[in-house]
Amino acid sequence: MRKKMYKAGKVWVAATLAIVGVMTGGAVVSADDNGDELGVVADEPAPQPDRVVVLENDDTTSAASAPASADTLATSESSVDNTSVASAGSDAPSDHLSQSANSSTESLGSVASAGQALSSESANAVTDNAGSVSSATTPEVSSATSQQSSAATEIVPSSVSSVTSASTTVSRRGLTREVTPSAQATHQSEAVVKQQVPKSTAQVVSAKAAPQATKHATVSTAKVTVAKRVASTTAKPVTKKVVKPKPFTGYKKGVFYQNGKRATGYLSDGKHRYLFRNGVKQKGVQKFQGTYYMFNLRDGRMMRNTYTASQWGLWYLFGADGRILTDVQPWAGGYYTFDARTYLKHTNVYEPARWGTWYMYDETGRCVSGYKYWQNGLYYFHPGTYLKATNETVWENGNAYWADGGGVVRTGNWQIEHAIDTGTSLVGHSPYVWGGGRNSWSIAARQFDCSSFVRWCFANSGVFAGNVGDAVTYSQTSLGQGVPWSNIRRGDIFFMDHIGHVGIYLGGQYFLHDSPSSPTGGVGVSRLSDVVDRDDRAYAVPWYDIVDGVVRRLV
């Protein structure tokens, strides 16, 4: 009877311990043959409260080797009944059972404390990790969605609840021991948390800390904060309108620049027009754009409407646009003609214009109107038309002349014309000799002075003009008939330079005489407008200014 009671007590104690362990989530710890306490390993969660997993002859089972999946856990389970638990402790003595019960109670407390500490430490670690993760500014953590946060929240509680629902029996060195579900739950919770913390736990903590931002915003608070900080600290770029300086135009050290480059071409500096080559003014006659222009020899200004000398001394006419002119051109109240090849004006020439009409140009190049002595003959050109008079009567100082078919003007008196023709034959062939013509050999040598020359011309026409040996200007002033200067005509003699010089009037302001001041330096033809002594400039006045006004008509 006592023996039955003893066995019944052991069964009751074992059952009581099992129930207490299941209710409190603790672990029953039994001693091996040597009385050593087995280690507690919670490596697999129990599937149901009324079922346990028996691991036989497994000395290497550990918490690290248990699978974490619920499906894997279900395949490792085996069904045992309560009688096996009861039979496991029926052979132990009663005192030993009591010691085992006390030891189990203490182990339960230590395991529970360890689980609580582990849970607290895990929670702190999770919180710390979550805080550190939530404070990070990496896009992966801050951009977690609310769906991931919910998944993380659901994983941890389900794992813990499945572990705490039953106890597990583990084996060490052929002995079995029972591990309470609480220890398994603690270990499993720690394993699950360790697997899920890198993402899910941080997202859960972040969601708890800022539920509204996690729920509605897709951009993390850290990212917004950084964006605000960048916006507040970064100055907005100020667009400045860059105005490029205009290229320099003007003079610099005597060189003219246009738009920053040395000027070349026909340009204006704002006041006048110049021709530049490599920034330097050109002067004188310059070729440009297929023609020639004249630029002032002093300052380089382009010259217009001018007849002027070039840098080499030749004269040219330039028009209103500055270009050099050719052919017949109006200038200074008259007309001039300029060679199409040399650009020089024509002088003392009778020639046709481009339209075929012939014109006479005097020694200045001016187109002649009125009388012109040319090629030992006197011609008349009508004013306005500049055409030569032929086969018609022309007039001067009230006296009528006749222009023959060739345009040569004559008086119609043969004595006058013969005397003029005799003297004209010596033009350029008889140099002036003071006191000459006073004897036969001097006359034969054609050596005359002014009075002896006049005497010899009229003597060849049968007209007395003084004796050979004593003919002088003073004696000739009493010859013939005196007439006023205003009525002077062709063939009259007149006196100049205080009766110191005498000549034969040819008409049209021309006269025939023998003088060192004539164009030939002897017998020659001069005009009253010509300057006296043009070689030595002794008088530097025209002949007209030294005319005495004494006129004698011999025929």
Image: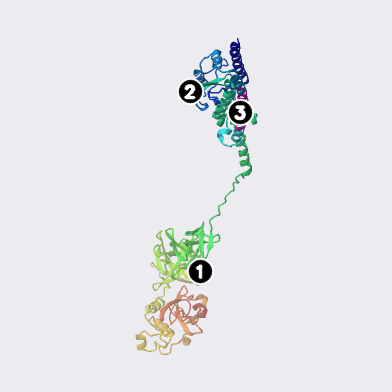
From what the image shows, is residue 479 above or below residue 158? below
Quadrant, the C terminus: bottom left
- The residue closer to the viewer here, 82 or 294, is 82
At which x and y percent is residue 121? Answer: 61, 31
Q: Relative to residue 354, is residue 192 drawn left or right?
A: right
Q: Determine which residue is flagged by label 3.
A: 114
Contact between marks 3 and 1 (CB within 8 A): the answer is: no
At which x and y percent is residue 407? Answer: 40, 68
Amino acid at circle 1:
Arg
Amino acid at circle 2:
Asp
Q: Is disc 2 placed on a helix, strand or loop?
A: loop
Amino acid at circle 3:
Ala
At which x and y percent is residue 344? Answer: 42, 66
Q: Is disc 3 placed on a helix, strand or loop?
A: helix
Q: Relative to residue 12, is residue 348 drawn left or right?
A: left
Q: Determine which residue is flagged by label 2.
A: 58
> Residue 288 got which mark?
none
